Image (spheres, rainbow, N blue to C red):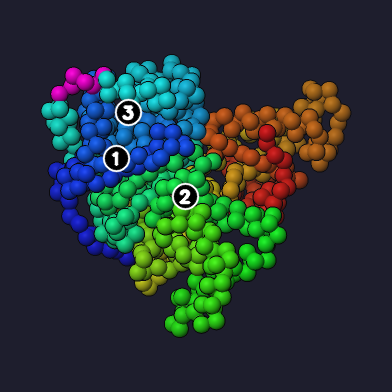
């Protein structure tokens, strides 16, 4: 069993909590800027000092107390990434509460489950649409006493409500938690499709962030360091960075709308960014398409190739040749500097996680001037467990363990993690906790290898959870089980691992098709003919649309392909228990899967 560990760099007293982390930042530099935010999209970035942010946190925390939130109560937050999200998070901690994030794209079914399983008592949502979803499941979530809407003045209402709550009460509540106390419950997809509540402690965030700052000081803690969050704060990766900025001394901004992301990057000018590989792919593809449209495809391709070759040469003993350096300078003038400008012009570093970036893109961006430090982690590890360092990088790997972290490879190749960031267990699910944790080691379900220098590489996925190119975890069973109930459908295999969207391979039911055709007044036809019949396809479209209602947009099926053969025990694609042999299907029908992402397949409206 191969194992590699990194020693802890910063010890934290067990009596502390995240409120102390914010207090240290405010005390150290009360007039230094902590957050910059906008009150309107085309408006300026408004700076908030540590003193000002703390005052707003206390005022909102008082409002939560006035609304009946008790220490340990769960406060739900359902919103896009915006300043109010960060404010509510810190305010909930100041009130002694436990914030529970919900994706703003969550289905009513997902919202109902999270609100009931976490026992959320007060829910803050962004807009009327989110409030409508909450109202739709109100009968199933009786513990939710109140729903507040940010766009309808929820923050101002909380401030007004808490006017009579004494400062001493917030001071008292801020000191109640310690490192072992639950700080948040983040829901992640499980193998059954029903999200599991990951309980992360104050210590998980506190110890991990202060140690990560020490390990990544050049990236996140240099004078003038600043980052723009555009990933959902409901995702543990963004949440980790939103906390990390406090001990790092960095300035945090929020970009709630991907449609204005480039505009926000240009005006905020971050020095480091975090994103999933899909973002880097989109920037590259967008630049390439723009070059093609402008008749400069050949110039772009030469510049991109030069960027990659130049970066690879940096890893050789002799480095880039003088001729390659000259080519790189020309490529920079013609193309590469424009890509840097798209990211604001100041970004030197990026932290990528959620799915593999790929060696080619890693070298491309380093050649551009953006060092992408690829890392690896899960919700259960408070985001990062490993990451490449500025001084120790191997492109194609996911880096070294963070300080206070141990990584090992089990006999079957599974990656196991132990350390300061490992969660304490799944909420109200001891069985799942016992399956995942043993002697403090978390079984990730991913397969990997560790080289002689301690760098981890991901080689596969032991579990069936699909991770899209955008970093979204998708449990295929949620969609598959619903679709199999349709009379036309025999089997479904949801696909999309490291792909831009979710697709599905579908087989028609040889026994169900004749009955469906007869019931709908249609003539007899072969399964091949039925797979092309407009009415059959329309019915399957509706079935897919219904199944998609159980999941968020990012988890929904966008395209499907009807296979020409059923999956049965006889042909080896089903086990005796009628379970699909997923790996075999994906291997044998790899061509059909590729076709889905090359424009073939049936689009779902």
Residue contact between numbered discs 2 and 1, judged by CB atoms under 8 Å? no
Point out the tag, 3 or 2, that comes first from the N-terminus: 3
The quadrant where residue 154 appears: top left
Name the foreground residue: 429 vs 285. 285
Q: Secondary structure at mark 3?
A: strand
Q: Secondary structure at mark 1?
A: strand
Residue contact between numbered discs 3 and 1, judged by CB atoms under 8 Å? no
The magenta-colored residue range is 161-166
Q: Residue at x 72, y 29 (%)?
A: 539
x then y, percent, for residue 603: 70, 39
Q: Residue at x 40, y 52 (%)?
A: 270
- The answer to whether residue 331 is left or right of residue 510 is left
Name the foreground residue: 414 vs 153. 153
Q: Report crowding for label 1: few under 14, some 14 to 19, many 20 or more residues within 10 A (C-alpha).
A: some
On screen, residue 285 above or below 433: below
**Circle 2 residue:** 266
x then y, percent, for residue 441: 31, 53
The quadrant where residue 165 appears: top left
Magenta stretch secondary structure, dominant: loop
């Amino acid at each position: 069993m191969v194992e590699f560990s990194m020693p802890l760099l910063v010890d934290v007293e067990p009596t502390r909590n995240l409120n102390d982390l914010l207090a240290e930042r405010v005390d150290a530099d009360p007039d230094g800027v902590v957050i910059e935010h906008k009150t309107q999209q085309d408006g300026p970035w408004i700076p908030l000092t540590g003193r000002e942010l703390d005052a707003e946190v206390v005022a909102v925390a008082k409002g939560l107390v006035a609304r009946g939130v008790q220490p340990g109560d769960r406060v739900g937050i359902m919103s896009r990434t915006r300043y109010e999200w960060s404010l509510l998070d810190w305010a909930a901690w100041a009130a002694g509460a436990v914030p529970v994030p919900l994706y703003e794209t969550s289905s009513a079914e997902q919202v109902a489950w999270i609100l009931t399983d976490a026992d959320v008592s007060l829910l803050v949502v962004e807009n009327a649409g989110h409030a409508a979803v909450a109202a739709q499941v109100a009968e199933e979530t009786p513990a939710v006493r109140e729903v507040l809407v940010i766009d309808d003045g929820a923050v101002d209402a909380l401030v007004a409500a808490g006017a009579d709550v004494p400062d001493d009460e917030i001071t008292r509540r801020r000191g109640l938690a310690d490192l072992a106390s639950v700080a948040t419950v983040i829901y992640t997809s499980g193998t059954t499709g029903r999200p599991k509540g990951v309980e992360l402690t104050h210590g998980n965030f506190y110890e991990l962030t202060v140690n990560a700052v020490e390990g990544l000081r050049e990236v996140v803690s240099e004078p003038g360091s600043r980052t723009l969050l555009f990933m959902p704060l409901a995702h543990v990766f963004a949440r980790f960075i939103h906390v990390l900025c406090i001990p790092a001394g960095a300035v945090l901004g929020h970009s709630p709308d991907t449609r204005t992301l480039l505009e926000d990057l240009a005006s905020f000018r971050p020095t480091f960014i975090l994103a999933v590989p899909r973002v880097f792919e989109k920037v590259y593809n967008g630049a390439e398409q723009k070059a093609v449209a402008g008749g400069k495809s050949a110039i772009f391709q030469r510049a991109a190739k030069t960027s990659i070759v130049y970066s690879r040469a940096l890893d050789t003993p002799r480095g880039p040749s003088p001729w390659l350096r000259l080519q790189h300078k020309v490529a920079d003038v013609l193309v590469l500097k424009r890509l840097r400008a798209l990211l604001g012009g100041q970004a030197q570093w990026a932290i990528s996680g959620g799915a593999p970036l790929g060696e080619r893109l890693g070298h491309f961006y380093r050649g551009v001037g953006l060092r992408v430090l690829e890392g690896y982690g899960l919700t259960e590890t408070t985001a990062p467990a490993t990451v490449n360092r500025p001084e120790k990088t191997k492109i194609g790997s996911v880096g070294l363990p963070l300080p206070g972290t141990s990584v090992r490879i089990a006999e079957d190749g599974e990656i196991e993690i132990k350390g300061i960031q490992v969660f304490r267990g799944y909420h109200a699910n001891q069985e799942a906790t016992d399956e995942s944790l043993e002697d403090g080691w978390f079984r990730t379900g991913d397969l990997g290898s560790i080289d002689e220098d301690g760098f981890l590489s991901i080689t596969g996925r032991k579990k069936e959870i699909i991770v899209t190119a955008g970093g979204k975890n998708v449990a295929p069973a949620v969609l598959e089980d619903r679709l199999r109930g349709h009379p036309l459908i025999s089997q479904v295999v949801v696909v999309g691992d490291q792909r831009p969207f979710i697709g599905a391979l579908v087989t028609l039911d040889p026994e169900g098709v004749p009955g469906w055709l007869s019931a709908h007044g249609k003539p007899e036809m072969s399964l091949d003919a039925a797979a092309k019949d407009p009415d059959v396809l329309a019915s399957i479209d509706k079935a897919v649309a219904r199944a998609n209602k159980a999941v968020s947009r990012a988890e929904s099926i966008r395209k499907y392909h009807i296979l020409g053969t059923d999956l049965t025990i006889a042909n080896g694609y089903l086990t005796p228990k009628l379970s699909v042999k997923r790996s075999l299907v994906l291997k044998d029908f790899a061509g059909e899967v590729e076709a889905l992402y090359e424009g073939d397949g049936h689009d779902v409206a």
